Amino acid sequence: MNRIKKLQKQLSGQKFSSVLITKPENIYYLSGFTGSNGILYITASKATLITDFRYFTVAKKQLPKGVDVFDQKEGVGKLIKAKSVGFEECHITVVKLRALKKSLKGVKFLPSDYLVERMRMIKDKSEIQIIRKGVRIADECLRRFIKTVKVGQSEDEMEWNLLSIARNLGADDFSFPPIICFGKNTADVHHQKEDNKLKKGESILVDFGIKYKGYCTDMTRMIRGKSKVKSKDVEQKMYSIVLEANLTAIRAIKVGKKLSEVDRAARLVIEKAGYGKYFGHSTGHGVGLKIHEAPNVSELSKEIVKPGMVFTIEPGIYIEGVGGVRIEDMVYIDSKGKVEVLTGFGK
């Protein structure tokens, strides 16, 4: 209920007097409700979950004290009497918005400007405890996974091994379909699974995360092959540059500093080494209930570093026909401004 009260306090500074929360992760964040059909309606003094008969029992178990349940069969017109209502413009469909306007004639609908996402950007103590535990599972998962890797294994076989290990360690699931690729395919930034098999001496890129109690983790590591072929010298050079970019960006994180400057710190290392054109994505992104959420660590980011933020640092170099390297860590900025690297294994 504390998060709902925090949101309610923010309503006084908005152009709308109440807000409809439709994004599932935002509903969960505010109320704990996990059902697949629900809308959270919040006014300055009241919070109500709009759902159907299937979820009445689970709602009563999950919702904090003070949040009512409203049967959607009754029609939202019986519940919503406000003159202005905020809505989640990044989530609600045009069809759904039209239906709401038809049901609530005379009500003015205004974009809510990512109110809940801004709250979620700053993690509280309970969230950090869950994320830390999730990262420990992910670290151990990778440690055990490396021991299972063998020449001749396919990407799909490796993925199933990784999932089996993660579930045995207590993970709920993957945070996202993992990227496991080897050889020249490591240059494919978001490689889609193919029927490739590991050859002797090939390096492996593993980009994965696990979900634990609803929260995501994310990390990327290179498992380097043991071939003595000279072409590996290029791969080693790329790895050293990306590692330096990763560490430089982490050192650049300071409370009050623009996240665009953190991105620039990583990018400058790679540019000075002559590989600038091979690093085409942002340096990082926020992680929480979603694998990609605010804040963005990019050249265009307008956010500044704040205590409570959790985000990734993941510079990379990708050369088609040669290979690629990405090293990704999750970092947390504590209440005193100290930067903690959460992901610890395999760098």
Image (spheres, rainbow, N blue to C red):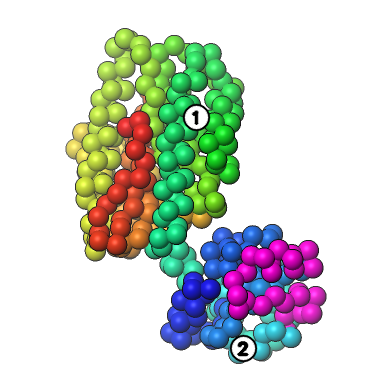
**Disc assigned to residue 347:** none
Drawn side of residue 97 relative to residue 272, left or right: right
Location of the C terminus (image quadrant): top left
Q: How many marks?
A: 2
Q: Earlier in the sequence, mark 2 or mark 1?
A: 2
Q: Secondary structure at mark 2?
A: loop
Q: Quadrant of residue 27?
A: bottom right
Cβ–Cβ under 8 Å for marks 2 and 1? no
Q: Which residue is mark 2?
A: 82
The answer to whether residue 130 is visible is yes
**Disc assigned to residue 180:** 1
- Give the class, few, some or many, for how many residues have Cα within 10 Å of label 2's Cα (few <14, many ≥20): some
Q: Position of residue 70 (x, y in %)?
A: 72, 77
> Per the image, is 198 magenta?
no
Magenta span of residues: 53-77
**Residue type at numbered disc 2:** Ala
Q: Secondary structure at mark 1?
A: strand
Q: Does 195 appear above or below 317?
A: above
Q: Residue at x 35, y 13 (%)?
A: 226
Q: Nearer the viewer, residue 89 or 12?
A: 12
The answer to whether residue 296 is visible is no
Residue that sits furthest to the left in the current view: 272
